[in-house]
Each structure stands twice: as C-alpha cells, then as structure tokens.
Image (cartoon, rainbow, N blue to C red):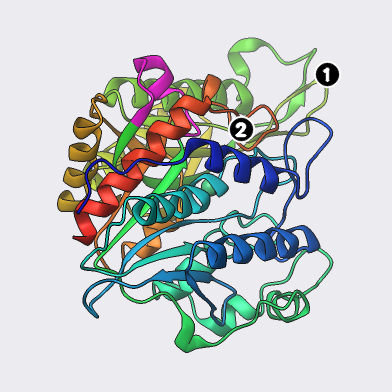
C-alpha cells in the first residue's frame, strides 16, 4: 500500500463549482430543492462523476443514490455521504461538500493504488433539507427506520405534488433492495453552519454528536385593557410578563454551560394594538443540549420561573413541551478515528457538538456514525452568503479521506 493519499483539491473545487451552477441564484447561492428539475440535473452530474470514478451506481426506492467501490472482502461497507438538495437561496457547500468530498476521497484512494478491506459507498441522501417535503432528513429517516416509506411517499409540497410522483417524474425512483447497506461506519463531511470553529481559529472540527432539541409553546394570559385609564399597579400585562420569560430562556441557557442554547424565536401579543394593554401572548421556546438530563433540567427551571412569575404578577402561564428530538452522541470509535485523522494531518483536534440535524443522526440508528465539520465564514448558512475557504474544504476532505481509510482497512 502506498502512503499518504491526498485529495485532488482542484478536482473537488471544480466539481463543487459545477454543481453550484445547477440552480445558481443571482446572489451567489443555489436553489436546488429536493426532486426539482435542478435536483435531477445535479443528480445526473453526480451519477456521471460516480461512474467516471469507477463506482457502481444504484438508486433506491427513496431516490437515494449510492456509488460502490468494492473492498477486498464482502463485508459491510464504510458509507460516506450527505445531500445535494438545498433550501431556497441556500449556500453552495451545505450538502454537496459531503457528497463530492466523499467522491474525492474515493478518487484519492484510486490514485494512490489503495485497496481497502471494506467496500466504500458514496451516498447522496434524498430530501435532507425538508424545505419542499417536510420533515427534514426524510429518506435517511426511512432507511434508518424512523419513518415508513408510505409516509414519505405521501409527503406533498405546497402545490400538493407528492414525493413519490416527483421521484418517478425525475427518473430517480429505484428499488428497495438498492438502499445503502447497514454500514460498518458512516462518515459525513459538512460545513459547520455555526461560528464555533471560526471563533476557535481552527479549520476543521471533530463532531461529538447532534444535540437534543426540545420545543415549548408558552401561553401567557393577562387582561387586555385600555392603555390610558388603567393605572400601572392594577394591570395584568401579558407582554410585560412574557418579556421576563424571554429573558429567562436566555439566562437559563447562559447559566447552564458553554454548549446550552435557548431561543425565543416567535412571539405573538394580542390584540397587538398601540393603545391596548396586551391581554395574551403566545410564544415559543427552543432549548438544545447534548445531555438529556441537562435539557430536562432547563425545561424544569423554566417552568419553575414561569410559576413564580405567575404568582408575582397574577398572569397565568401555561407551558406545553410539544416536541423533543433526543440527542445523538456519535460512536466513540468513529469519533476517535476522525480525531486521529486530524492528528495525522497536523490539524488541531477541536471537538464540538452539532446544534443542527443531519442525515448522520438517522444513519446512526443503524450503525456507528461520525461527522467532520468545516469552518463556515461568519458562521452563516442556509443563505447565499454561506462560504468556506478552499483551504478549509481541502483540509476537511483530507480528514474524511484518512478517517475513511482507517475505518475501511
Ligand atoms: Zn446540510
């Protein structure tokens, strides 16, 4: 076996540019919604590039595309993948980096004359973003066993067009037996979509897992009243009370630790008139943390503060915890190999948690998984300004390559 395989950075940047032309927006981003004509054109290109790299391409019943490179033994493959669909006016690297980075890794193994013990499969997961067909990570969720296929097929976009019908229309409705196999390991290279790596001054991050998320609906009931005749001491102003809850969400997360986050992103006061004391406020709260007990603890402390506020002010507060996505810690062995790959390349081993969902979450239901993050400029994503430096992309792809080689051999 020859030593030191490395990514062909020029090839990778060229293909990222080619793909970014499909659905390109005036502002330098892309709109390539799942199963749209743009997605089809992107898929056709990807299929060509997979075949050019000598991979055997198959498409499954959810449109997931898999390109296979055989190993020395007929055992479970090492899967490398991500998605090529985008949000509306999204960035050019969110998704494609993980698919084309994987393809660049396979090409690097070929160029170095390296055969691996495990087969390697490059996967493009359908409908990761969930913008056109909700929910997100739909196809990896079916493969991982979270959703039924019938449920996925019946998802419809805002025009009522069904997922299954669009798969068939663009020519990417394949067979169930062509799904990606249960993997010996799964690796996903992705842009960070946050500012942590930039803040730390490191190009690449070793992802420890995907945080748990919980959503609350909070209703504050006071008394609507005329803004003029009602004296301050007799008011039950729902918005004033709600503003203290907004501050509580922020403070609870800050007091917990460096990783915890808490956000009130939606707040609707009623009747929302300039000369009326607000009688009712409906607001959201979003808490995230890797540790389920810590996440529960934040919610409990929030409830306690809501009760205290209610006792102090006479408004009533109801807290409905209506949705939770449990945390997914990645496999320690896979995470360790990613860290070792960073070390081999002389890169810092900066560990962080993902605050957003990725296909790796559902793939992790079926086997050991891990992710590699590449620094995002300004932490921006899901927008046209999303950008990662070419040198950072190259570094991330090389980490993917070396981690894949360690896991596949
Ligand atoms: Zn993504």
Which numbered circle lies on residue 222?
A: 2
| Label 2 environment density (alpha carbons within 10 Å; few <14, some 14–19, many ≥20) | many
Per the rendered image, the range of residues in magenta is 192-204
Please give the name of the residue rendered at 24% of the width and 43% of the height, measured from the top-left corner. 338
Which numbered circle lies on residue 4?
A: none
The secondary element bearing badge 1 is classed as loop
Q: CA distance from mark 2 to mark 1?
A: 16 Å
Tell me residue 39's x, y (percent): 71, 60
Tell me residue 34's x, y (percent): 68, 61
Q: As rendered, which of 327 and 144 lies closer to the eye?
A: 144
Please give the name of the residue rendered at 72% of the width and 30% of the height, measured from the top-left corner. 224
- The answer to which of marks 2 and 1 sits earlier in the sequence is 2
Q: Which residue is mark 1?
A: 275
Q: As rendered, which of 335 and 408 lies closer to the eye?
A: 408
Tell me residue 191's x, y (percent): 48, 37
- Residue 256 quadrant: top left
Is 200 magenta? The answer is yes
| Label 1 environment density (alpha carbons within 10 Å; few <14, some 14–19, many ≥20) | few
Tell me residue 184's x, y (percent): 24, 67
The correct choice, above or below, for 84 with respect to 73 in the image is above
The answer to whether 78 appears left or right of 107 in the picture is left
The secondary element bearing badge 2 is classed as loop
Can residue 340 be seen here?
Answer: yes
Can residue 310 be seen here?
Answer: no
The answer to whether 13 appears left or right of 277 in the picture is left
Question: How many discs appear?
Answer: 2
């Amino acid at each position: 076996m020859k030593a030191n395989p490395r990514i062909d950075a020029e090839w990778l940047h060229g293909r990222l540019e080619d793909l970014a032309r499909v659905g390109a927006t005036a502002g330098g981003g892309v709109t390539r919604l799942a199963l749209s004509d743009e997605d089809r054109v992107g898929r056709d290109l990807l299929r060509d590039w997979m075949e050019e790299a000598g991979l055997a391409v198959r498409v499954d019943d959810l449109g997931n595309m898999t390109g296979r490179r055989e190993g020395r033994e007929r055992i479970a493959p090492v899967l490398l993948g991500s998605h090529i669909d985008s949000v509306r006016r999204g960035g050019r690297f969110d998704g494609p980096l993980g698919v084309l980075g994987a393809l660049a890794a396979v090409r690097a193994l070929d160029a170095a004359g390296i055969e691996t013990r495990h087969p390697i499969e490059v996967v493009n997961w359908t409908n990761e973003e969930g913008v056109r067909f909700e929910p997100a990570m739909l196809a990896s969720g079916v493969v991982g066993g979270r959703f039924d296929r019938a449920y996925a097929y019946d998802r419809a976009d805002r025009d009522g067009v069904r997922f299954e019908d669009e798969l068939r229309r663009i020519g990417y409705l394949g067979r169930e037996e062509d799904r990606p196999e249960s993997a010996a390991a799964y690796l996903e290279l992705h842009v960070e979509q946050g500012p942590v790596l930039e803040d730390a001054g490191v190009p690449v991050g070793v992802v420890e897992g995907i945080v748990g998320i919980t959503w609350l609906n909070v209703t504050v009931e006071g008394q609507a009243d005329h803004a003029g005749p009602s004296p301050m001491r007799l008011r039950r102003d729902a918005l004033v009370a709600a503003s203290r809850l907004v501050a509580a969400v922020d403070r609870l997360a800050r007091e917990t630790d460096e990783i915890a986050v808490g956000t009130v992103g939606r707040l609707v006061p009623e009747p929302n008139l300039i000369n009326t004391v607000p009688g009712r406020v409906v607001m959201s709260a979003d808490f995230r943390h890797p540790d389920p007990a810590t996440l529960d603890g934040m919610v409990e402390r929030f409830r306690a503060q809501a009760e205290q506020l209610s006792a102090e002010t006479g408004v009533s507060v109801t807290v409905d915890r209506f949705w939770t996505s449990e945390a997914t810690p990645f496999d320690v062995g896979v995470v360790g190999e990613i860290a070792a790959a960073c070390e081999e390349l002389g890169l810092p081993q900066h560990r962080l948690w993902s605050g957003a969902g990725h296909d790796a979450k559902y793939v992790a239901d079926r086997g050991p998984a891990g992710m590699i993050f590449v620094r995002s400029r300004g932490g921006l994503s899901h927008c046209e300004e999303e950008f990662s430096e070419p040198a950072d992309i190259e570094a991330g792809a090389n980490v993917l390559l070396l981690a894949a080689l360690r896991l596949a051999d």
